Image (cartoon, rainbow, N blue to C red):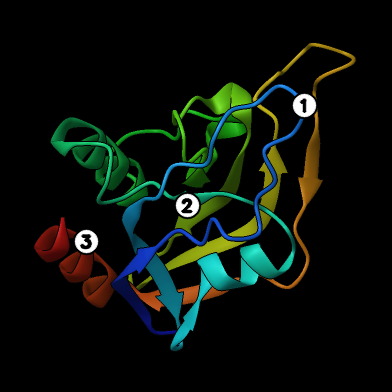
Amino acid sequence: MDQLSLNWMDRDISHISHGALGGSATPRRFLDFEVNGVSLYTKLAALKLDFISCLGWVGDEFDARSRSTLLIETEGEMRHGRVALYVCPECVDPLCGSITVAITQSPETIEWSSFAYDSGWVGEPDMDVFEEVDGLGPYTFKKSDYRRLLLQTI
């Protein structure tokens, strides 16, 4: 059984270029998902994916909605009911892309599987991207520990 924890993390913006159109990278402090002591944010950053978790930085209403989807109380808002674990660190807009996961449950477990980058542009031929992210999951958590962590932390 895998072990899930939530720990505060700061977004690393030192490697982000600002491009010809300007813009900036906003520093963020957020709750990161760690599985078996390994930060998923760090794994994504190593793949050059600039996303931060959906928890701890947007606001109470967003955290409550995210917790509800993580607990499978409500259906995920992404395609096929998938849940966005990591989102755009500037605006949270799904059209900026996100890292999504399929969450399933049994009476004793919760499983995160099929991690993927989702552009959010469903049905737009030139913009619709859905690609699996290698090296993440599947992860299986003891349901009681998983629920306790999410209900106590957020």
Which amino acid lies under the numbered mark 1 shown in the image of this protein? Ala
Residue drawn at x 55%, y 49% is 51
| 102 on left or right of 19 | left
Closer to viewer: mark 3 or mark 1: 1
Residue drawn at x 31%, y 41% is 66
Residue at the spot of label 2: 52
| 87 on left or right of 59 | right
Neighbour class for label 2 at 10 Å: few (<14), some, many (≥20)?
A: many
Residue 100 vs 39, above or below: the answer is above
Residue at the spot of label 3: 150
Which quadrant is the C terminus positioned in? Answer: bottom left
* Residue 3 lies in quadrant: bottom left
Q: Are marks 1 and 2 in contact (CB under 8 Å)?
A: no
Task: Give the image location of residue 123, x and y in percent.
Answer: 77, 12
Q: Nearer the viewer, residue 76 or 15?
A: 15
Q: From this viewpoint, which residue is outermost toward the right?
A: 126
Q: Sequence order check: which comes first, mark 2 or mark 3?
A: 2
Residue 144 vs 82, above or below: the answer is below
| 20 on left or right of 12 | right
Q: At numbered mark 1, what does the secondary structure look like: helix, strand or loop? A: loop
Res. 137 visible in picture:
no
